[in-house]
Image (cartoon, grey):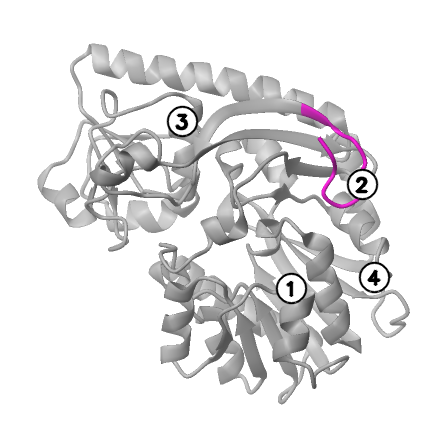
Amino acid sequence: MKCKITNNEINEFMNFGQMPLANGFLNKDKFKDEFFYKMSVGFSEEISLFQLNDHPSPQKMFNEKYPFFTSGSKFMINHFSEYCTWVKNSYLKEGNKVVEIGSNDGTMMQFFNEVGCDICGFEPSKSAADISKSKNLNTFVEFFTENNVKDNLKNSKYKIDAIVAANAICHVPNLIDLIKGVDYLLSKEGVFIFEEPYLGSMYEKTSYDQIYDEHIFIFSISSIKKIFELFNFKLVEAVPQITHGGSMRYVIARKENNKINENSNLQNQLSYEKKKNIDNIDGCLGFKKNCEKSRFNLIEKISSIKKKGKIICGYGATSKSTTVLNYCDIGEESIDCIYDTTPEKINKYSPGKHIPIKDFKDFYSNYPDYVYLFAWNHKEEIFKKESDYKGEWFSHVEI
């Protein structure tokens, strides 16, 4: 196994087995042709980077049928409004030029547009990009690569004041190519700001469901600092976020940019990661043991519930649910169905284990004894909406 950044050999430390596409919700007639790959992870101690070994091609994951839309969550809409305000107040002024990587349905672009920024987005999924375009937002239906940047924004070299992203950079297997695109566009005093699931939070919660085909990397502050220093950039700030079960907002600037200095707390954060073994292989090995224990406990709990003759349903047909169901070998014999709000998933089946996906409206007329909350990172929003349910919620992480 080779590191995707340094190309040096690294060791695989955990194998999750054969895994389908995390967002590959499918009809019955597609079961026999379902795609699987070996999902295993390794760690580069050289740059402290947690990464998938093998993965499907980006074209297979992010295509015209991609079923995730940012605007489907009120929580995420509010979060992107805050994100935009924070970026604008901290680093921008009206009229500045902004580019979003992985702009999805244009939710965050719209906020930047409303505060007077000149923004465009790169979104490879046509289904999401079409929604963005319908809002009259300038969207390129392309992956953010060096060549695509030069083709579409050839007159913007060194003219972009901010490049932003949210839960998108970890999706990019060729991170070096993406950084070259950033380098082409970013002005001398510009900033690259992005949020991603945080390795420290994943370790703390044993939320192994953060690992799936789209999450090629799970970043830490240490890994981001080391990666970008290889390309003449510097990490200046890392701001914790509650999104996705624990994320980090990173601010990157050109190394020679003397107008933006390193945040005073950054060295403390790096010291914390060293203390908690987030920056080395020992943290990975401890995480592996915790995952195995978590899987055993989950299987035991579900078995105990089913022995009592009780009904379990799932809530939230998330990408993360694919990892849980397939890693723990949980199928329709254990979970009757999964309720979801996404039209593109309803009446289809979960990847790999083929559990039926039903409209969340049916949940009200068919309350089960137990509900497995796959969308645990949206628990506050869901518990508020489903306050009439009096059964037991549970998950593999503490809720």
Give the CA separation, mark 3 to mark 4. Answer: 39 Å
- Residue, disc 1: 145
Q: CA distance from mark 2 to mark 1?
A: 22 Å
Mark 2 element type: loop
Q: Residue at x 37, y 47 (%)?
A: 380
* Numbered mark located on residue 326 in the image: 3
Q: Indicate yes or no whether the magenta region holds residue 5.
A: yes
Q: Secondary structure at mark 1?
A: loop
Q: Position of residue 390 (x, y in %)?
A: 19, 34
**Figure quadrant of residue 25:** top left
Residue type at mark 1? Thr
The residue under label 4 is 233
Which amino acid lies under the numbered mark 2 shown in the image of this protein? Ile
Q: Circle 4: is it few (<14), some (14-19), or many (20+) Cα within 10 Å?
A: many
Please report the bounds of the magenta region as a residue range: 1-12
Q: Earlier in the sequence, mark 3 or mark 4?
A: 4
- Judged left or right of residue 225, residue 348 is left
- Indicate left or right for 160 with 265 as reference: left
Crowdedness of circle 1 by 10 Å Cα count: few (<14), some, many (20+)?
A: many
Q: Mark 2 or mark 1: which comes first in sequence?
A: 2
Q: Which mark is residue 47?
A: 2
